[in-house]
Image (cartoon, grey):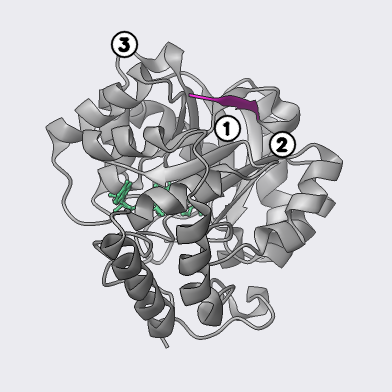
């Protein structure tokens, strides 16, 4: 394993982070016992960063991760979120100070711990920018002062909104997803320069583009336009013909980022933990990488609409178009 410093938090984080959304069945039903084994295998092999949210599996992922971490909590850096819950409910998104303050106690209970290392606003694009800046983040910063959380961050998809909020409030970290991998590298156009300048910890989630960059391919709910998914299927076939796994290449590519401290990959299986760790410090084969990049070039950097319309990124296309 390789560890890097997560910006001004000073936390030493493993470059591969454990994304716990699959533990909440977000990619299909997860085997619970195998999920526990995957968490323990990750810790045994040097992964010390765990990312979860009450949203994943509508609290299921937090509960399962909390159970798996009994006896291991002191070995890990635990990151969770607040503000996004269950889209089917009227209060499915709630970025009010009152809800954020209640949310941390609920997460502490489910995660069976008395502190959260990193508490993040989950998907700020579903809120109003002004509320995130003037109410949500100040509430989180009060929780930091109270000692319930050690650091405070923001997460989301549209890069410009993340940048605007990070310019307005002194956050410790920024997490974005599907914005630095073989299909999209625009993280570097918008957020990386700001994060570097300000010493903000930068977290890159979904190096497999939420399973698009794997042999299994996109889950049915995936928001990317169909032409993106089709090009990735072609890239997977190209790799297979050459005895290479596209997921390995995608991990190797993402892990080479010079500023991102931790790359979060979703895992609920021991085999995926072992496979992803094997990509640490490995350079992608240049010929295969060039071949894959040529196949993906026509669909590179296509982003989709996410959140409230006023928060869409300029140029974002309709989901699943
Ligand atoms: P991902 O790109 O990491 O893909 C995960 C999927 O790929 C899962 O189905 C997993 O089983 C599969 N997989 C993992 N390793 C594999 C391998 N070696 N070979 C083949 N398949 C493999 O997408 P993700 O899970 O959405 O993102 C990673 C994590 O980042 C999440 O679990 C979550 O913790 C975090 N995240 C946060 C936000 C946010 O805060 N807004 C958004 C997205 C993701």
Distance from the alpha carbon under mark 3 to that under mark 2? 28 Å
Q: Residue at x 26, y 72 (%)?
A: 220
Q: Residue at x 53, y 52 (%)?
A: 122
Say which element carries label 2.
loop
Say which element carries label 3.
loop
**Residue pointed to by mark 2:** 172
**Residue pointed to by mark 1:** 118
Q: Looking at the rendering, which quadrant does residue 71 occupy?
A: top left
Query: Could you classify mark 3 by the number of other residues whose Cα lies within 10 Å: few (under 14), some (14-19), or many (20 or more)?
Result: few
Q: Where's residue 12, x and y in %?
A: 61, 21
- Residue numbers of the magenta segment: 1-5
Disc assigned to residue 81: none
Query: Could you classify mark 1 by the number of other residues whose Cα lies within 10 Å: few (under 14), some (14-19), or many (20 or more)?
Result: many
Q: Are marks 1 and 2 in contact (CB under 8 Å)?
A: yes
Q: Looking at the rendering, which quadrant does residue 110 occupy?
A: top left
Q: Where's residue 216, x and y in %?
A: 24, 62
Front-lying residue, 237 or 181:
237
Does any portion of residue 262 appear in the rendered image? yes
Lower position in the chain sequence, tag 3 or tag 1: 3
Q: Are marks 3 and 2 in contact (CB under 8 Å)?
A: no
Disc assigned to residue 71: 3
Q: Is residue 63 left or right of residue 87?
A: left
């Amino acid at each position: 394993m390789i560890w890097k410093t997560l910006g001004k938090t000073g936390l030493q984080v493993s470059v591969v982070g454990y994304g716990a959304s699959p533990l909440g069945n977000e990619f299909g039903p997860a085997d619970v016992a195998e999920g526990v084994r995957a968490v323990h295998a990750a810790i045994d092999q040097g992964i010390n960063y765990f990312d979860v949210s009450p949203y994943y599996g509508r609290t299921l992922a937090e509960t399962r991760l909390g159970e798996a971490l009994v006896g291991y909590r002191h070995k890990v850096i635990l990151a969770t979120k607040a503000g996004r819950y269950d889209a089917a409910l009227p209060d499915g998104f709630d970025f009010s100070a009152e809800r954020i303050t209640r949310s941390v106690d609920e997460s502490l209970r489910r995660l069976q711990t008395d502190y959260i290392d990193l508490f993040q606003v989950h998907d700020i694009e579903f809120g109003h920018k002004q509320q995130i800046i003037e109410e949500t983040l100040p509430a989180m910063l009060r929780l930091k002062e109270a000692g319930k959380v050690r650091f405070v961050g923001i997460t989301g998809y549209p890069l410009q909104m993340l940048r605007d909020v990070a310019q307005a409030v002194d956050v410790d970290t920024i997490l974005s997803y599907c914005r630095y991998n073989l299909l999209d590298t625009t993280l570097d156009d918008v957020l990386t320069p700001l994060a570097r300048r300000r010493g903000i910890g930068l977290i890159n989630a979904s190096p497999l583009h939420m399973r698009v960059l794997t042999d299994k391919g996109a889950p049915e709910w995936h928001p990317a336009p169909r032409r993106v998914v089709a090009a990735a299927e072609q890239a997977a076939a190209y790799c297979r013909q050459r005895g290479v796994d596209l997921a390995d290449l995608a991990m190797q590519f993402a892990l080479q980022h010079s500023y991102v401290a931790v790359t979060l990959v979703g895992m609920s299986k021991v085999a995926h933990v072992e496979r992803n760790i094997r990509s640490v410090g490995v350079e992608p084969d240049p010929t295969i990488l060039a071949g894959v990049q040529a196949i993906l070039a026509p669909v590179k950097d296509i982003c989709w609409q996410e959140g409230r319309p006023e928060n869409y990124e300029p140029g974002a296309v309709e989901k699943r178009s």
